[in-house]
Image: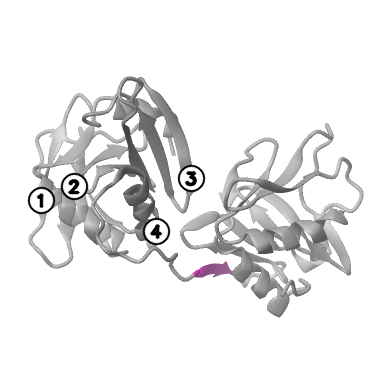
Amino acid sequence: MKYILLVLLSIVVISNSAFADDRETVFEGLGAKIVTVVDDMTDEKSGVIFLDFGSIYMAVYGYNDYAIWANTDDLNFAFDETHLIRVGENEPFTLKSLIKRNCLKPTNAVEAEAVIKSLARGEEIKLRYYNWPQHEKIDKKLQNLNFGFIYNKAVNLFGWKDFGISTELAPVKLNIYIPTDIGSEGYVSITVEGNSDLGLGKNFDQFGGGTTINVGVKSGFGFNKGHWICGSVELSGNKHLIIRDSNGIIVFKEVLPTSYICAPAGERWPSGEIAAKKAWEASPLGSIEIEGSFGKRVMLYGFRELWKWGVENSVFPSLE
């Protein structure tokens, strides 16, 4: 998600707040990001929720205000088409195209509230927009099953209207991919729905097997042939695997393996046992990060479910 651009673009959209003032990211994960803004003059706190939907993102500025922005360089909302958004089976609402900002806005606060409330309930919203200059019609479904949890954070932070929606996280669902072609025996790839940067990888049998927890594009700690392993190697020796609890406090930080000895089965890493236990304890609201190229901090929502799958279907030892 183009978060730097998101904040810059929000300057022209968020009313009654000055994005030239102090701003801070207070939550990031589950396909969303919350940024708070404190007015230097009045100390008034406001903020915005960014929801990532792939080619587009939605910026929610309050319980009855939002905008839909392009998340790719090749998307331009056509100024001479009728863009629509639909809640349930109701008649669709029309969205305004703001040409200079390349975004779509609701025509009134009542319709905006209906959309935000429906999303917070975890419901599916239908969006139709047109890409200029080809005038290509694009239908997209918007849904974030954990937006209710995220929205309630904004209720507490900014005093937004309370919709009376549960603050609980949605039950975890795993997306499991097992190839069937010859030569792929043993391989499994699993991601967490709604938290796709957290996953599990089971290596090909022909490469020695082994199963690891994956963070983004990086392979983390795991288990293989009776040994704790790590799939990430940093030759420089100054990169770490870091686990934080729900308060952002570091509960585990250890240097990654610095040499290739057992690749591709995974380097032996005794610290993996401690990392696994700390991740289990910090799940689901803690985070995990593997430093280095393409490294990112990822929520541990779904970690326990991934680990249980590894216990039942692979070689992971139980952490319960």
State whether residue 125 appears in this view.
no
Q: Is residue 46 visible?
A: yes
- Does residue 203 appear left or right of residue 178 in this picture? right
Around disc 4, counting alpha carbons within 10 Å, would you say few (fewer than 14), some (14 to 19), or many (20 or more)?
some
Question: Circles 3 and 1: CB distance less than 8 Å?
Answer: no
Q: CA distance from mark 1 to mark 2?
A: 7 Å
List the residue tagged with mark 1.
110
| First in residue order: circle 4 vs circle 3 | 3
What residue sits right under mark 2 in the picture? Answer: 64
User: Which residue is under mark 4?
Assistant: 149
Mark 1 and mark 4: span between their CA atoms? Answer: 22 Å
Q: State the CA–CA distance, disc 3 to disc 1.
A: 28 Å
User: Residue 3 appears in which quarter of the rendering?
Assistant: top left
Of 319 and 311, the residue lying toward us: 319
Q: Give the residue number, with chain letter if any, for mark 3.
A: 28
Residue 286 relative to residue 12: left or right:
right
Q: Which comes sooner in the sequence, label 3 or label 1?
A: 3
Foreground tag (4 vs 3): 4
Amino acid at pointer 1: Val
